[in-house]
Image (cartoon, rainbow, N blue to C red):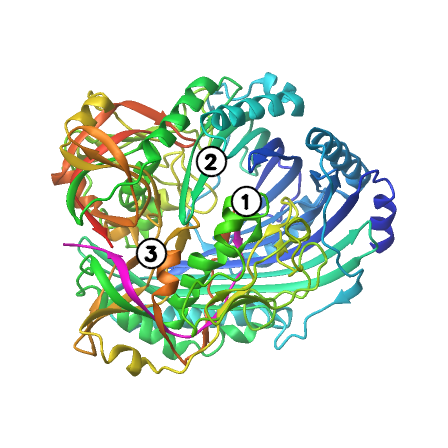
């Protein structure tokens, strides 16, 4: 493969050219209701070529290696059209020339677990859900497993072949009474082994219990509250509220954004430190090399409350004159890499959960990650459920908990950070530029935020 | 016909989707690049001893391998009680315009340049974006019971928008159009986007409370999600739909008629037959407030004892084009009739959450205040909350006579009363 890609790159008559070729094995198993609902094996196979000329990009994807040479020529032709129109300069930050073949050190390679064993395990989880309470009418289980053999070569001499594992799963219960339907679930995920799927029984029973209790829980009352987010929701918060804003493709050709996000400005209190990293193979955002063949490194974004960095591709780093971070990622071979997060983390603090709630007269303890969205400045994120905090104590269960905020005021309003670091993994993923779901995760502690807008009933 | 041999007693189906897409993009007020993609995806489904499994690949000439994989998986497969359909007569629909294949990069770049500069003329501080894209799609479906069909489609898309940053205020706005051919009215697109910018430039505020709110067509899908999800045969068959036993009941305002239609010619979301070979049809889901129909595929139709509605996707039923029948009031009058309220063009997170409970809430990312029947600036840091089951029954003020087609939906503006607005 190495020689094949390198030979094709010799056809490139541009400033820079790269080829990605991937073969994946994807297994998806789903349960809806009482039975197995879906079993699919997918084997995506294909590649793409990206070419850069005078600052303009061309991109061509293909399915057959027979079409590789034509794809190189097509991408270069397109880059010339773009570059000639732009009349600019190709600026890629320098990256080390790498030659490496990498296979993760698996804790439990899912290929060594038979399909029988996987189905038996998921059947058991299904039985736990359906047997928990008569009010539970359906199990919702998703298990996705993808193993990718990805080869990358560029005209600078880098050749990286890496095997990547991504397991993402959700185990959930739906309870129904008349017109009222509620659900609760737990998430699992890993980049290193099937063992992430084991021993979920007790956590799953807790989710079932919550699903049943949510039938009687009121909708949270709309208002502005002090909110304590559990680690999973804090992970979603930092991803939506700040991670996307840190992606340098927002700012590299946008002087007003670059000014607003000028390094050195204060964004939060001294207790706040945020970083994004390719470390932590137990989580779904683990990455050894990004999709430009750049070794990933930990990128501090906020240190002691001060904005200190951002996430980069080689182009954004080159144009902004900042260090590369290894954040160029593509969902698959049909897309070019763009700036994306990996594992986005908040460094732990010292507060216990009890410390965080004890002086709140009326507030909300928001639990679990239910999805979110941002437009850069404002964000929205959903908890799986919540508990009101009354007079310093956890009180009644509430449902339909959605929170919103303005990133700049919300980061300033984080006034306590917990000591209970935990990862956020599940079946979903991050979406950007039509590339979804990309595996991401993060390690975060609980956080306390003042003045959070909570949507809900009257 | 199907192109591969199956063991006796096993049913098989081959679906092949090939596409070529190409496009140009402009970001940060400048030309960014071009792209050209091809993909050839084959999917085999088999039913062996009443169990169904699926294998897919983009590898060239992979049919035999896919059959082998699907047969290996089938012992674990989904228990199904249906057969793949036999030969059937479907009505061909005009969905492809050969002219789309002729649209090249220079033409797209010229259109994109024009879109971009129309915004920059309004305010050079805008960071404008535009994209143009074309796609040719060919679908073949055949099965071992004799069904064989194919169709071709073309899609052309154009979008434009911008980001306008003033300190810590980020205004994002934009619109897009899609069509089976390059007949997009760019002047209308530009006018609409520039009008949004003019309306949204000034910032105002609104107190927390309950207000009448106009939801633009692009946001109506979020409001209707509880109905569309609950009338999906899969949700009904799995016992999670609250509308399971409500067919025939008047649950909504009588002005609400919701239709799914995959048969419309020259529409990007139409197809002559669904992913399983069942001809598409017009499905009236809600007729003047009365819940009428559940969307089904082969599996859920069998499970529920209903006919298949031509909505199969291979992973449960889904609508083709959802149409909310418009009202008779011009948008201008709907705005004029509001003393104090909002018109919402963009939300975030309204798609999250459990749709079956009816609660829909989200952050208003682009919302304008209406005061004394006039647009009075952009509101920020607000959330809206409704319960669709309740609001479409008791709180519907009106539907506009104007509609907008957005990919797979055609919706009017919807005005609801008593929408909870939370603000910080």
**Left of B8 or right of it: where is B51?**
left
Q: Residue A444 in magenta?
A: yes
Q: Position of residue B383 (x, y in %)?
A: 26, 49
Chain letter for mark 2, please.
B
Q: Position of residue A183 (x, y in %)?
A: 30, 61
Figure check: B47 above or below A66: below
Figure check: B3 above or below A182: above
Q: Verify CB contact (< 8 Å) between mark 3 and mark 1.
A: no
Q: Position of residue A224 (x, y in %)?
A: 22, 60
**Left of B141 or right of it: where is A204?**
left
Q: Tell me, yes or no, whether dots 3 and 1 are on the same chain.
A: yes
Q: Which residue is mark 2?
A: B162
- Distance between the Cα atoms at labels 3 and 1? 24 Å
Q: Position of residue B327 (x, y in %)?
A: 21, 24
Label 1 SS: helix
| 10 Å crowding of disc 1: few (<14), some (14-19), many (20+) | some
């Amino acid at each position: 493969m190495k020689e094949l890609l390198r030979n094709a790159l010799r056809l490139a008559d541009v400033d820079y050219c790269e080829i990605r070729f991937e073969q994946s094995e994807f297994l998806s198993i789903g349960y809806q209701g009482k039975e197995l609902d879906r079993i699919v094996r997918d084997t995506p196979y294909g590649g793409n070529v990206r070419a850069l000329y005078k600052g303009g990009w061309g991109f061509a994807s293909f399915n057959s290696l027979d079409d590789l040479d034509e794809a190189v020529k097509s991408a270069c032709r397109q880059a010339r059209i773009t570059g000639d129109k732009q009349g600019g300069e190709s600026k890629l930050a320098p990256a080390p020339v790498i030659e490496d073949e990498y296979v993760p050190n698996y804790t439990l390679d899912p290929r060594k677990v038979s399909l029988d064993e996987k189905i038996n395990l998921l059947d058991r989880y299904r039985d736990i859900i359906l047997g928990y309470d008569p009010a539970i009418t359906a199990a919702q289980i998703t298990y996705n497993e993808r193993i990718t053999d990805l080869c990358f070569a560029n005209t600078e001499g880098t050749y990286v072949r890496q095997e990547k594992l991504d397991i993402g799963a959700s185990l959930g219960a739906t309870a129904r009474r008349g017109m009222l339907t509620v659900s609760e679930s737990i998430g699992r995920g890993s980049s290193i082994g099937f063992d992430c799927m084991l021993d979920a029984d007790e956590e799953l029973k807790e989710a079932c219990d919550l699903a049943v209790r949510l039938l009687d829980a009121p909708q949270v009352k709309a208002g502005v509250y002090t909110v304590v987010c559990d680690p999973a929701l804090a992970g979603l918060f930092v991803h939506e509220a700040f991670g996307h804003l840190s992606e340098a493709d927002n700012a590299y050709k946008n002087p007003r954004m670059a000014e607003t996000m000028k390094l050195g400005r204060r964004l939060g209190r001294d207790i706040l430190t945020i970083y994004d990293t390719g470390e932590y193979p137990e989580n779904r955002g683990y990455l050894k090399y990004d999709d430009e063949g750049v070794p990933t490194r930990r990128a501090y974004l906020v240190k002691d409350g001060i904005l200190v960095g951002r996430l980069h591709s080689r182009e954004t780093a080159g144009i902004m004159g900042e260090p590369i971070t290894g954040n160029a990622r593509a969902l698959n071979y049909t897309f070019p890499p763009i700036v994306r997060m990996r594992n986005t983390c908040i460094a732990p603090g010292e507060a216990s959960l009890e410390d965080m709630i004890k002086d709140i007269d009326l507030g909300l303890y928001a639990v679990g990650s239910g999805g979110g969205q941002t437009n850069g400045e404002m964000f929205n994120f959903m908890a799986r459920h919540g508990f009101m905090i009354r007079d310093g104590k956890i009180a009644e269960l509430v449902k339909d908990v959605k929170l919103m905020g303005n990133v700049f005021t919300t980061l300033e309003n984080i006034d306590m950070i917990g000591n209970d670091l935990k990862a956020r993994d599940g079946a979903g993923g991050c979406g950007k530029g039509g590339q979804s779901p990309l595996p991401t995760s993060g390690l975060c502690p609980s956080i306390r935020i003042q003045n959070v807008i909570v949507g809900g009933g009257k | 016909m199907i192109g591969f041999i199956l063991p006796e007693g096993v049913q098989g189906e081959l679906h092949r989707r090939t596409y070529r897409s190409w496009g140009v993009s402009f970001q940060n007020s400048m030309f960014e690049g071009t792209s050209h993609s091809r993909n050839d995806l084959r999917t085999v489904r088999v039913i062996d001893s009443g169990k169904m499994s699926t294998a897919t690949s983009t590898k060239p000439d992979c049919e035999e391998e896919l059959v082998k994989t699907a047969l290996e998986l089938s012992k674990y497969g989904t228990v199904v009680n249906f057969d793949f359909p036999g030969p059937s007569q479907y009505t061909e629909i005009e969905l492809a315009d050969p002219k789309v294949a002729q649209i090249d990069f220079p033409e797209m770049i010229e259109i994109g340049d024009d879109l971009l500069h129309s915004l920059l003329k309004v305010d050079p501080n805008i960071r404008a974006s535009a994209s143009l894209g074309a796609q040719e799609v060919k679908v073949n479906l055949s099965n071992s019971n004799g069904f064989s069909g194919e169709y071709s489609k073309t899609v052309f898309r154009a979008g434009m928008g911008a980001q306008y940053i003033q300190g810590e205020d980020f205004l994002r706005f934009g619109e897009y159009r899609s069509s089976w051919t390059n007949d997009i009215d760019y002047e209308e697109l530009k006018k609409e986007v520039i009008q949004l910018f003019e309306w949204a430039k000034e910032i105002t505020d609104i107190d927390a409370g309950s207000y009448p709110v106009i939801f633009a067509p692009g946001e109506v899908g979020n409001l209707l999600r509880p109905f569309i999800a609950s009338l999906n045969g899969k949700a009904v068959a799995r016992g999670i739909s609250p509308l399971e036993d409500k067919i025939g009941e008047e649950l909504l305002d009588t002005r609400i008629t919701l239709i799914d239609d995959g048969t419309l010619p020259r529409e990007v979301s139409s197809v002559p037959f669904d992913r399983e070979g069942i001809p598409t049809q017009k499905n009236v889901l809600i007729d003047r407030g009365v819940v009428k129909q559940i969307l089904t595929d082969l599996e859920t139709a069998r499970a529920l004892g209903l006919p298949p509605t031509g909505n199969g996707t291979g992973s449960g039923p889904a609508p083709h084009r959802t149409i909310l029948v418009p009202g008779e009031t011009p948008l201008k009058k709907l705005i004029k009739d509001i003393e104090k309220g909002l018109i919402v063009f963009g939300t975030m997170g309204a798609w999250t959450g459990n749709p079956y409970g009816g609660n829909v809430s989200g952050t208003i990312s682009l919302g304008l205040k209406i005061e004394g029947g006039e647009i009075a600036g952009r509101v920020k840091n607000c959330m809206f909350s409704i319960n669709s089951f309740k609001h479409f029954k008791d709180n519907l003020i009106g539907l506009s006579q104007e509609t907008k087609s957005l990919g797979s939906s055609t919706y009017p503006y919807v005005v609801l009363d008593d929408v909870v607005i939370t603000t910080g």
